[in-house]
Image (cartoon, coloured by chain):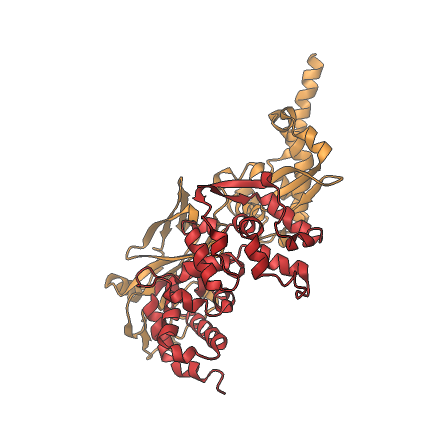
Chain colours: A red, B orange
Amino acid sequence: MEKQKIFKSKYVKRLKENLKSRHSIHLYSEQIFPFDDDETLVLSTIYKPKDLLKKMNPDNDLDSAIAIYEGYRELTLLQASDERFWTYLTHVDLYQYMIKRWNAHIEGKAKNPEKYIREHWFLLSESQQSLMRHPLSGLWWGVHLSIDEERNDKYELTKILFRQLDFATRTLPTYRLGRHKEAIIGILEFIKNNDELFRNYFEDKTRFVTRYLNLIGGTVNLAYVDRTFFIGKLNRVKEKIKQIGSR
Amino acid sequence: MNYNNIKFPYPVLKKNDNSILSYIDFSNEDIEITPSYDLFNFKINLSKIDNDDILKLIETGKTEYCVEVNCSSTLFRKVHTSRENIIEFSIPKLSLRGKVEGDCLIIARENIPDYNNSQAHEDYQGFYFNIKRGNILAYYGSFNFIADINYKKLKAVASIMEITEGDVEYLNVDLDNNKITLQLPKQDFKIYAQPLISKYPDLSPIFHSSIVYGALLTALYNFENYTDKLWAQAILYRMKEEEELKKFLGNDEKFDKAEVPDIAQILLGNPVRRLLNHLDKEIETTDEE
């Protein structure tokens, strides 16, 4: 099996500079992105997953999220947050997926193509928000935080998380809560148990849920408590959640 | 998370807070972080506390000492607990990058109905509180460190600075990376890269007092715009730890720009003196010839 490659840091920087100066915008519409193979490194412990590109589905984020997670389930936290790794995937291994899933700059729908490409092909910073918003690392982290090996269907809660991409990549990352797996599982379990409640205004309701739990974090150490705590707290505000959107 | 700015709906023992009038303290001396080959080993001392009611709750197992470690760059978040006031734990190096933050607390392990504290401020007298599992009863303070910095090698210039070839006409100082990057024009870099120059120890005073010193001045004058960079964190760490540098650092972790030349010279181990000593030796050698 072929070992996984990543870009060198300096090359990532150069790619960013080329984009910023608009010299390379046109390259992001090509069928293959031209890159310098001398500017890559090999990860000694990670193998390139077989047929990952084929498994990525530009029309279904859940399928893609599971595929990318299964392909790279051995990543350490350090590797899974490495800009060089994700930038290599967006430009090389999964470039064809990227130009199908994130093609507003090609279709002429992006107001600012340079900004659009920067936001989708690169990690904007080393923050939690940036990692979870990135079109590929956000998929991996979404599964990592929601997979529950104790269930018959370990992806049962992941399916809820990816009901709306914004929930996984925008709403949850806003708070520290979003990096506590027990909190994520508690929230998703509550949504699963109250499916009817979340049929409409899903985005507004999930935003309320995360904001509410974050407030509780002022007096309770949220990393200390498990999923039952979060489910219990949310059960108490069911009526409030119900009212969202109905006023 | 800085719990100092949070107003709790019940009395919490905190430093510089009068909701409970008892002693609690925490400083850098109470933190020991020792890196091994693949782990960061932590030893946190939480013994500086004097409040009978809270200590009794620990004895009875209703509360415990906790250290929460957070790393935004790798989404690492974990609480380490103990019934002992010295907590020891390890975290794999492969789980942390950049800034790592820790909070030291005492947390309720179970619900404590009718909690009150005999040392609480008089405003709380006669009130009882329904404490729930996970509620914070005491906050020692927080700490942070940079996982990528090899603190033992910080005195080496190479830990914060590197010289690279750049597409530039003149020497350029780039502060936007984790190391201060000195970009040399291609032709100059070729000369610099010759082993007899770049690897020759006798030439280091010349480099330090000219190119490196100049670059460090640029970095220090622009310091406040780059505090998230590793080079800045490394300099800040040295300024907090080294006696000679401590005096330049204010409580807000800022320094006076007028002091920058002195700070730069101390950071580089007095490069001007080293240069003059080097030149003096050269003259002596020439005279002897």
Quadrant containing the N terminus of chain A is: top left
From this viewpoint, which residue is outermost toward the top?
B289
Q: Residue at x 42, y 69 (%)?
A: A160
Taking depth in this image into account, of A151 and B154 the one nearest to the observer is: A151
Observer able to see residue A221: no
Observer able to see residue B215: yes
Taking depth in this image into account, of B29 and B111 the one nearest to the observer is: B111
From this viewpoint, which residue is outermost toward the right?
B169
Total marks shown come to 0
User: Would residue B159 be found to the left or right of residue A70 on screen?
Assistant: right
Does A88 appear above or below B124? above
Displayed quadrant of residue B218:
top right
From this viewpoint, which residue is outermost toward the left?
B60
Rendering coords of residue A173 (x, y %): 49, 64
Does A193 appear above or below A54? below
Taking depth in this image into account, of B247 and A246 the one nearest to the observer is: A246
Rendering coords of residue B101 (x, y %): 46, 55
Rendering coords of residue A221 (x, y %): 38, 65
Displayed quadrant of residue B135:
bottom left
Does B139 appear above or below B261? below
User: Would residue A227 be found to the left or right of residue B169 on screen?
Assistant: left
Rendering coords of residue A61 (x, y %): 49, 63
